Image: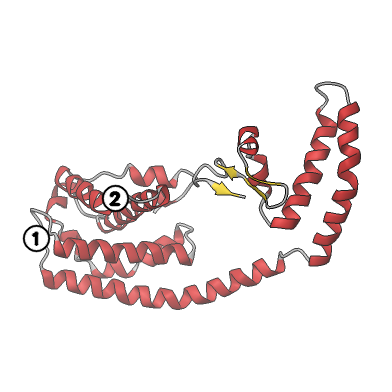
Amino acid sequence: MSLLKGKSRGSTIRRITFGTSMNTYLEEYGAYLFCPEGTPKMVQNSVSKASRAKVFLKYLTLGWPSIKYWSWEFLFNIPLIKTYPAALRAAGLAPTTIVLYVGQAISFLEYFRDTPAKYSRVTNGQLVMVTRELRKLLKDLNRNVLGHQSLVKQGKLLRLVAKEDLAKCQVMAKEKIPSLLADMKAAPPRDPKTRYRFFGYLVAYLSSIYGHRSGVLTRMRVREVQDAIGDEDTGYLINVSMLLLTSGPFLH
């Protein structure tokens, strides 16, 4: 499934199109998933769910002429459905992501059963068989996910920084930062070398205390620091609004 490969996978999936009647139905499905009162993350999730359903449908239409899409009969293809997880795996998706795709396929079929497409020729009995097959696949996949999650956790534990190293980092940074501030004051204008060294020590110091990635600090704006809530006794709360392009505000 080439549409799942590459860095622009999300935009590629959203551009998937079918026949007119199918596109209309999928727009209605997207409207059903949409959360007008939800958070930005919930809205983003609803778009992702609709996109996963499109991938499932696109996979099942393999070998079908587009002129016959309107009948939805391509949904009843048990042999092809059995290979769906393998196709997702071959596209490079992680086991946990494959579970999301298969789970969304089940959710779409449940919606399709309760809200049939206008020209659908798929019977309820066929929908039951397809849904049952997907549920079995999902059950088998969940067993693999447990092992995958265990291996991921082990890998993360191996990358943990020792407490002793964190403490040493804090001591060294506290000793070095005052002298760097003095060097910055004495440095010529537009000389970034000392400023960059100061910023490196400051990021290391704060990260060793709070555990945040350096991106939290590198994306922090002067205005956000000025708007911080708190005082010297209770501490300060800084809202970093540009932590990542795909995430919302972050409180530090």
Pick the residue in front: 86 or 50.
50
Pick the residue in front: 201 or 108.
201
The tag earlier along the polypeptide, 1 or 2, is 2
Q: Horizontally, is 116 left or right of 46 in the view?
A: left
- Residue beneath disc 2: 34
Q: Kindly identify the amino acid type of the residue bearing the numbered disc 2.
A: Phe
Q: Horizontally, is 78 left or right of 174 in the view?
A: left
Tell me which residue sits at (90%, 49%) in the image.
Answer: 175
Query: Callout 2: few (<14), some (14-19), or many (20+) C-alpha neighbours within 10 Å?
Result: some
Q: Is residue 86 visible?
A: no
Question: Where is the N terminus found, in terms of image quarters?
Answer: bottom left
**Residue 134 position within the rendered picture, expressed as x and y whole percent measured from the top left:** 30, 71
**Residue 202 position within the rendered picture, expressed as x and y whole percent measured from the top left:** 78, 45
Q: Is residue 49 depicted above or below 203 in this figure?
A: below
**Residue 142 position within the rendered picture, expressed as x and y whole percent measured from the top left:** 43, 75
Report the Cα–Cα distance between label 1 and label 2. Answer: 27 Å
- The residue sitting at the top extreme is 189
Tell me which residue sits at (85%, 33%) in the image.
Answer: 194
Q: What element carries label 2?
A: loop
Query: Callout 1: few (<14), some (14-19), or many (20+) C-alpha neighbours within 10 Å?
Result: some
Q: Can residue 60 be seen in this view?
A: yes
Q: What element carries label 1?
A: loop
Q: Kindly identify the amino acid type of the residue bearing the numbered disc 1.
A: Arg
Q: Is residue 14 depicted above or below 87 in this figure?
A: above
Q: Horizontally, is 141 left or right of 243 in the view?
A: left
**Residue 241 position within the rendered picture, expressed as x and y whole percent measured from the top left:** 55, 41
Q: Residue 54 carries which label?
A: none
- Residue beneath disc 1: 121
